[in-house]
Image (cartoon, rainbow, N blue to C red):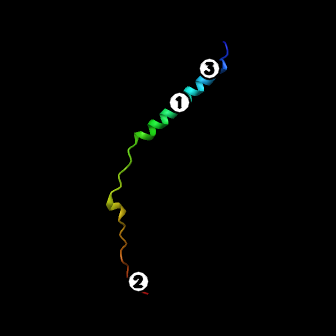
Amino acid sequence: MPQMAPLMWLNLMVMFLLSFAIFMIINYFMTTPKKISSEAKLISHPNKIWKW
């Protein structure tokens, strides 16, 4: 079995890196961000009457 030429290894690495980068980019843009409702921003603090 003949050995692979160094250029073939370089082509293989470039192809792997490109496919990995494309996969990561597609993964990043597939999920839609959740919308934050305005009700969630308002935090109500109940008034507590402390009896010491």
Compared with 38, 5 (above or below) is above
Q: Residues within 10 Å of mark 3 (few under 14, many from 20)?
A: few
Q: Secondary structure at mark 1?
A: helix
Q: Separation of disc 1 and disc 2 at Cα?
A: 63 Å
Residue that mark 1 sits on: 18
Q: In which quadrant will I find the C terminus?
A: bottom left
Mark closer to the chain start, 1 or 3: 3
Mark closer to the chain start, 1 or 2: 1
Q: Are marks 1 and 2 in contact (CB under 8 Å)?
A: no
Question: The disc labelled 1 sits on which kind of residue?
Answer: Leu
Q: Are marks 1 and 3 in contact (CB under 8 Å)?
A: no
Q: Residues within 10 Å of mark 2 (few under 14, many from 20)?
A: few
In the rendered structure, the answer to whether residue 2 lies left or right of residue 32 reads right
Q: Residue at the spot x=38%, y=44% of the render?
A: 32
In the rendered structure, the answer to whether residue 31 lies left or right of residue 1 reads left
Mark closer to the chain start, 3 or 2: 3
> Residue 24 location in percent, x, y?
49, 37
Disc count in the image? 3
Question: The disc labelled 3 sits on which kind of residue?
Answer: Met
Q: Residue furthest top?
A: 1
Q: Residues within 10 Å of mark 1 (few under 14, many from 20)?
A: few
Question: The disc labelled 2 sits on which kind of residue?
Answer: Trp
Residue that mark 3 sits on: 8
The circle drawn on residue 50 is: 2
Residue 2 sits in quarter = top right
Q: Secondary structure at mark 3?
A: helix
Labels 3, 2: front one: 3
Residue 37 sits in quarter = bottom left
Q: Residue at the spot x=63%, y=23% of the render?
A: 9
